[in-house]
Amino acid sequence: MGQTASAGGGGSNTHTPQALYPDLSCPEGLEELLSAPPPDLGAQRRHGWNPKDCSENIEVTEGGLCFERRPVAQSTDGARGKRGYSRGLHAWEISWPREQRGTHAVVGVATALAPLQADHYAALLGSNSESWGWDLGRGKLYHQSKGPEAPRYPAGRQGEQLEVPERLLVVLDMEEGTLGYAIGGTYLGPAFRGLKGRTLYPAVSAVWGQCQVRISYLGERRGEAWGTCGESKFCHWGLWFWDGSSTPYKSRGNWPSSDPSPTSIQCQEWLRVFTAVT
């Protein structure tokens, strides 16, 4: 599982993502998701860090937009997001200052069963079958992985290093079952595959005392009928239902004046799509 890569080597041989990784393998719909207006603050908090689902050494602040790890020795501490994703394409930004990462700074996803605390310093995220993570310092991918044999990411020539900046994007495509990352507007390719059929949450694990890790949910796409944040055009304006007569009626909201009223056949199809994905 996972598309491996080389990210090791000296700092003097650092290259830009564009030079190293020309094959972006960008998930379908990602460009549209990122070009759409971002979710409002309330939606971002609903997709933020969960104060009830994190290590006891972590304090979640700002309604879920940030957490701070308390300075506890010989402990690795993690946090999970409030929302788990099993369908659709999702993206969120992680902001983690480089000087606050320490020896093990891992970003990725986890199931609800993944442990969020260990009594030693380690790459906790990705250490078992319930989580997947990218070690930002070592450039390695972890899933059921415990040692130096972990594959490298992203795909580059041996000895060339990608320095991960403060901000990076996490891209989870549950329609294709892939997890990837983007830096500076460049998608680095899929890091993990085979994720279909699971419910996965944003997650990180950290060791640096008083580090602050921020999360900003950017939205969701679920195929052609869906827009960002999982709201279709039809849900946003009020889903039109058909009662079997020749004239459809709307349950709530107002249909955009610029759009023609839907036909009964369209209503039946939209209702089928709506019930299939909710």
Image (cartoon, rainbow, N blue to C red):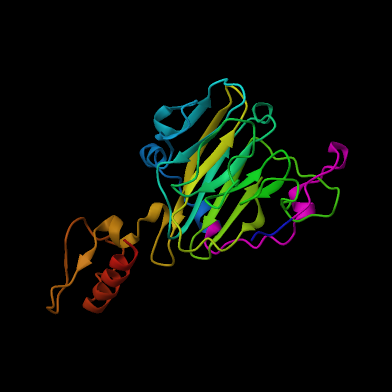
Seen in the picture, residue 140 relative to 265 is either above or below; the reply is above
Q: Main secondary structure of the magenta part?
A: loop
**Most foreground residue, 203 or 44:** 203
Seen in the picture, residue 232 relative to 96 is either above or below; the reply is below
> In the image, what residue occupies the spot 75% across and 51% down?
149
Question: Residue 259: where, in percent of width, then height?
Answer: 30, 66
> In the image, what residue occupies the spot 68% across and 31% down?
98
Q: Is residue 183 visible?
A: yes
> In the image, what residue occupies the spot 74% across and 40% down?
163
Question: Residue 240: where, in percent of width, then height?
Answer: 21, 66
> Which image quadrant: the N terminus?
bottom right
> In the image, what residue occupies the spot 57% across and 62% down?
27
Determine if the magenta segment contains residue 69.
no
> Which image quadrant: the C terminus?
bottom left
Seen in the picture, residue 111 relative to 3 is either above or below; the reply is above
Q: Which residues are magenta?
A: 5-30
- Give the quarter of the image for residue 233: bottom left
The reply, left or right, for residue 71 in relation to residue 145 is left
- Give the quarter of the image for residue 11: top right
